[in-house]
Image (spheres, rainbow, N blue to C red):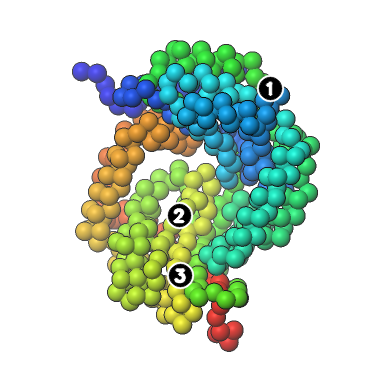
């Protein structure tokens, strides 16, 4: 019987120039999904211009030495193909989807954008104006303002999870020129940094040859290793307020340093613990009490949204009317306290294990879902076999493991609480 595990079906190849390829055949339909990354996210940008990585990545499809932005877009659209490049905290994400017959177009276009960008000055100015407009628009959102302020109180300036004030970011964007992008590109973009995964109806040897023909003679800098200290918990709880005009509701963000990374041995236990506490507004403890029973909000959730390469914040976010601010905060913190003292119930544990496993399997039903999981396994150094092992690891978690994670990673007693909206200044 053929071994159907991901470990057995996925082929890993390292090209002579350092690029890593992972290939999985899935001839269910005549398409191929690509997912990948390179190490050039915002963490690599200078502290006085953290927008530089985003601007650089966003400009890669705005023109090359061979073609204009419109020519590139038209060639992809005429085939119904998609190719995306976007910057994250630590990496630049690469993604693509096309019919199998159009894979040569995807690979050659990706090579063109990664190897031959020209960063047209007029396109940079248009991009900068769009980013600045988006930043200013976001500043009218209570949730955005509360979250930004929370990060400024929890993390030191220079930490990748610290959100600079909007005007600081706008100043950084405004001062960035073409030469800044070229310098960042030349310093951080190179083949040793690139990992590409292809899943779909392809012949691995042919695809490897295509990639090698387009990228084989590419040379560039080796990636710099991420070295990030863990952010400690604050010594005490703090509270801050952001007064905004004419807001019908207020947003509350409760957060603290999570100290959780994807490679932590108890990561899965912490994720299951959070799912039961507040990941879902409809079925979690926070949702059932604060939303359904008390009717204080339409939405409340908790999250380890940045627990990956680094340890971002643990947050709880809730939207309430100004009259219910104190009640919502007290109720939310009380629920977390009860969760810490009593732990997860056996029913909650079974429900979350089942839900997690179901979602995981559904995600692996598509080429893009498989490609994403393979890329994540490579990103965190687990190996492709981890995809096969994960469901069993989830099923093996017991109440004791979850309760240990609850006590380790949830700390309402030192949480930073930020309220943004229109409310009584005498609170």
The x, y position of residue 352, in whole percent, is 28, 53
The x, y position of residue 1, in whole percent, is 20, 18
Residue in front for this viewpoint, 46 or 341: 46
Q: Quadrant of residue 45?
A: top right
One can see residue 361 in this view: yes
Q: Quadrant of residue 235?
A: bottom right
* Secondary element at tag 3: strand
Using the image, tell me which numbered label, if any, was put on residue 304: 2
The x, y position of residue 258, in whole percent, is 49, 57
Choose mark 2 or mark 3, whichever is in front. Answer: 3
Choose mark 1 or mark 3, whichever is in front. Answer: 1
Residue in front for this viewpoint, 156 or 217: 217
* Secondary element at tag 2: loop
Residue drawn 65% across the image and 60% down it: 136
Question: What is the CA distance from the residue labelled 2 to the residue labelled 3?
Answer: 19 Å
Q: Residue furthest bottom?
A: 426
One can see residue 223 in this view: no
Ranked by sequence position, the earlier of labels 2 and 1 is 1
Choose mark 2 or mark 1, whichever is in front. Answer: 1
Q: Label 1 belongs to which residue?
A: 66
Q: Label 3 belongs to which residue?
A: 319
Q: Is residue 2 left or right of residue 72?
A: left
Residue in front for this viewpoint, 78 or 386: 78
Residue 6 in the image: above or below residue 271: above
* Secondary element at tag 1: loop
């Amino acid at each position: 019987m053929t071994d159907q595990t991901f470990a057995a079906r996925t082929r890993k190849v390292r090209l002579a120039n350092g690029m890593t390829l992972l290939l999985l055949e899935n001839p269910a339909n005549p398409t191929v999904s690509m997912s990948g990354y390179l190490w050039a996210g915002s963490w690599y940008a200078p502290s006085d211009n953290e927008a530089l990585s985003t601007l650089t990545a966003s400009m890669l499809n705005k023109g090359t030495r061979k073609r204009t932005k419109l020519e590139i877009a038209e060639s992809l659209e005429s085939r119904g193909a998609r190719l995306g490049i976007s910057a994250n905290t630590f990496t630049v994400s690469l993604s693509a989807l096309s019919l199998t017959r159009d894979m040569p177009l995807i690979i050659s276009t990706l090579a063109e954008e990664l190897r031959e960008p020209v960063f047209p000055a007029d396109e940079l100015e248009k991009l900068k104006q769009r980013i600045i407009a988006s930043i200013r628009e976001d500043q009218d959102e209570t949730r955005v303002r509360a979250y930004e302020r929370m990060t400024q109180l929890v993390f030191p300036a220079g930490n990748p999870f610290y959100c600079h004030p909007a005007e600081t970011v706008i100043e950084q964007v405004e001062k960035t020129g073409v030469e800044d992008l070229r310098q960042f590109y030349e310093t951080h973009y190179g083949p040793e940094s690139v990992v590409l995964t292809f899943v779909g109806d392809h012949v691995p040897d042919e695809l490897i040859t295509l990639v090698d023909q387009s990228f084989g003679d590419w040379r560039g800098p080796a990636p710099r290793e991420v070295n990030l200290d863990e952010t400690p918990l604050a010594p005490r709880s703090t509270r801050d307020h952001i007064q905004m005009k004419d807001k019908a509701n207020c947003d509350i963000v409760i957060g603290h340093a999570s100290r959780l990374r994807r490679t932590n041995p108890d990561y899965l236990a912490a994720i299951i613990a959070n799912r039961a506490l507040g990941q879902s507004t409809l079925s979690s403890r926070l949702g059932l009490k604060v939303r359904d029973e008390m009717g204080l909000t339409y939405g409340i959730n908790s999250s380890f949204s940045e627990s990956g390469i680094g340890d971002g914040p643990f947050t709880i976010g809730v939207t309430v009317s100004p009259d219910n601010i104190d009640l919502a905060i007290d109720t939310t913190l009380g629920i977390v306290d009860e969760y810490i003292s009593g732990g997860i119930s056996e029913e909650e544990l079974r429900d979350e294990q089942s839900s997690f496993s179901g979602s995981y399997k559904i995600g692996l039903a598509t080429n893009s879902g498989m490609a994403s999981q393979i890329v994540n396994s490579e990103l965190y150094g687990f190996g492709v076999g981890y995809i096969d092992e994960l469901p069993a690891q989830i099923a093996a978690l017991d109440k004791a493991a979850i309760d240990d994670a609850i006590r380790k990673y949830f700390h309402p007693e030192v949480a930073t609480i930020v309220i943004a909206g229109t409310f009584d200044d005498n609170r």
